[in-house]
C-alpha cells in the first residue's frame, strides 16, 4: 500500500468476530481428513527501525507454537518496508535483514508472493534507479525469495496452489492487475488442473474485497471510487475465469491491512489483515495485527481463522 493514509474511517469491510470465528467452505463432513495446515502471513513490512523486527519475531514464534504446527507458511508480500522508492543501500539493508530474520526464527517452509513494496526502484524519482540495474524491479524480489518466476503453481497434499503476481507497472507507480501473458498462463494452468483437485489462489492485492471500498474516503465524490491500486482492476475477467473452474475454492490476499471475507460464485475471498497492523503502530481501523490459519481438507473444504499474536 501507499506510505500514508488519512485516518478518517471508523469501520472496515467485515468484522474480526472476536478473532476466533471459523469460516468453512461447506458444512463439516465428519469423514473428511485435514491434509494441510497453512499460516498466511502478509504485509510484514520488516524494517530495522522501531518494533518491526521484534514484532515479526513474536509473530513467527506464535506460528511455530501452534498445535498442530502449520505445515507451510504462505508469505503474501510486502515483506519489507520498502524498496519500491529506495536506493540500493537501503534495499541491501532490508534484504539482509529479511534473510537473517527468517534464517534465525523460521523452521517452517515458506512459499512467497511478491508485493508492491518488494519491487525495487520502480519509483525512479525517489529511488534514483535508471532501470538498467541487474536486479532492478521484480528481479530484486525474485532473488530475495529465491524464485525463478514471479508467478507459479504447485501441488501439495492433494491441493493445487496458484501464486499470482498482480503488481503491474505504471509510471513511477503500479496498478493491481495481471499482465496478459500471466492471464493466459492462468487459463492454461486451470485447464491442466484435474477438476477434482481443489485450488487455492494466493495474491498480494485482492482480486475481490469488501474492505477496499472503505480504505480511504472512496465515497467522497458521491460515488464509490475504488483505486486501481487497491484491488485488481481486471477482477471481472479473473472472476469469470474462476467461474468456469468449480474447483477454485478460496483466494487469499493482503495489501489492504484489513480483514474481510467475500463469497462470490462459489469462491471465498479472504483479505487477511497484516502482520504489521498499522505499520507497526497497533490496529489499522478495527483490524489488529495478525495472521490467518487455514486448514485444508481432502474433500476440498477448508477452515479459516484470523489470529492475533
Image (cartoon, helix red, strand yellow):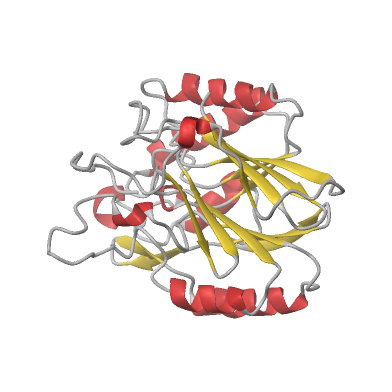
Residue farthest to the left?
Answer: 221
Q: How many marks?
A: 0
Q: Answer with the quarter of the image where residue 224 lies.
A: bottom left
Q: Is residue 141 visible?
A: yes
Position in image of residue 19 (x %, y %): 51, 32
Q: Tell me the residue at 39%/38% (across/down).
A: 81
Q: Position of residue 285 (x, y in %)?
A: 31, 36
Front-lying residue, 105 or 59: 59
Measured as percent of width and height from the top left, residue 258 is found at 40, 43
Q: Nearer the viewer, residue 19 or 251?
A: 19
Q: Quadrant of residue 193?
A: bottom right
Residue 237: x and y in percent read: 49, 79
In this view, the residue in front, 58 or 285, is: 285
Residue appearing at x 79%, y 65% in the figure: 197
Q: Residue furthest right?
A: 31
Nearer to us in this view, 284 or 26: 26
The structure residue drawn at horizontal position 13% and vertical position 64%, both measured from the top left corner, is 222
Q: Is 133 drawn above or below residue 309 in the view shown?
A: below
Q: Residue at x 37, y 28 (%)?
A: 280
Left or right side of 214 for 177 = right
**Does residue 134 appear in this view?**
no
Amino acid at each position: 500500500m501507499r506510505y500514508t493514509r488519512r485516518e478518517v474511517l471508523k469501520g472496515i469491510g467485515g468484522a474480526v468476530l472476536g478473532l476466533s470465528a471459523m469460516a468453512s467452505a461447506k458444512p463439516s463432513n465428519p469423514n473428511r481428513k485435514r491434509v494441510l495446515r497453512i499460516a498466511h502471513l502478509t504485509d510484514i513490512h520488516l524494517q530495522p527501525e522501531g518494533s518491526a523486527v521484534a514484532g515479526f519475531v513474536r509473530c513467527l514464534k506464535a506460528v511455530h507454537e501452534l498445535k498442530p504446527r502449520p505445515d507451510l507458511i504462505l508469505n503474501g508480500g510486502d515483506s519489507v518496508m520498502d524498496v519500491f522508492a529506495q536506493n540500493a543501500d537501503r534495499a541491501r539493508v532490508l534484504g539482509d535483514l529479511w534473510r537473517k530474520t527468517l534464517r534465525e526464527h523460521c523452521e517452517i517452509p515458506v512459499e512467497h508472493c511478491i508485493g508492491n513494496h518488494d519491487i525495487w526502484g520502480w519509483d525512479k524519482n525517489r529511488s534514483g534507479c535508471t532501470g538498467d540495474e541487474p536486479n532492478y524491479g521484480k528481479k530484486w524480489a525474485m532473488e530475495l525469495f529465491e524464485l525463478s518466476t514471479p508467478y507459479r503453481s504447485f501441488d501439495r497434499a492433494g491441493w493445487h496452489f496458484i501464486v499470482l503476481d498482480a503488481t503491474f507497472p505504471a509510471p513511477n507507480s503500479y496498478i493491481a492487475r495481471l499482465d496478459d501473458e500471466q492471464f493466459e498462463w492462468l487459463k492454461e494452468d486451470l485447464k491442466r488442473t484435474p477438476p477434482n483437485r481443489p485450488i487455492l489462489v494466493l495474491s498480494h492485492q485482492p482480486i475481490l474485497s469488501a474492505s477496499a471500498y472503505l480504505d480511504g474516503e472512496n465515497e467522497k465524490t458521491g460515488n464509490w471510487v475504488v483505486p486501481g491500486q487497491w484491488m485488481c482492476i481486471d477482477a471481472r475477467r479473473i472472476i469469470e475465469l474462476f467461474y468456469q473452474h468449480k474447483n477454485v475454492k478460496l483466494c487469499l490476499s493482503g495489501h489492504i491491512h484489513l480483514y474481510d471475507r467475500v463469497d462470490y460464485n462459489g469462491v471465498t475471498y479472504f483479505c487477511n489483515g497484516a502482520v504489521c497492523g498499522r505499520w507497526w503502530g497497533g490496529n489499522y481501523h478495527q483490524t489488529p495485527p495478525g495472521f490467518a490459519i487455514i486448514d485444508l481438507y481432502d474433500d476440498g473444504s477448508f477452515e479459516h481463522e484470523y489470529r492475533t499474536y
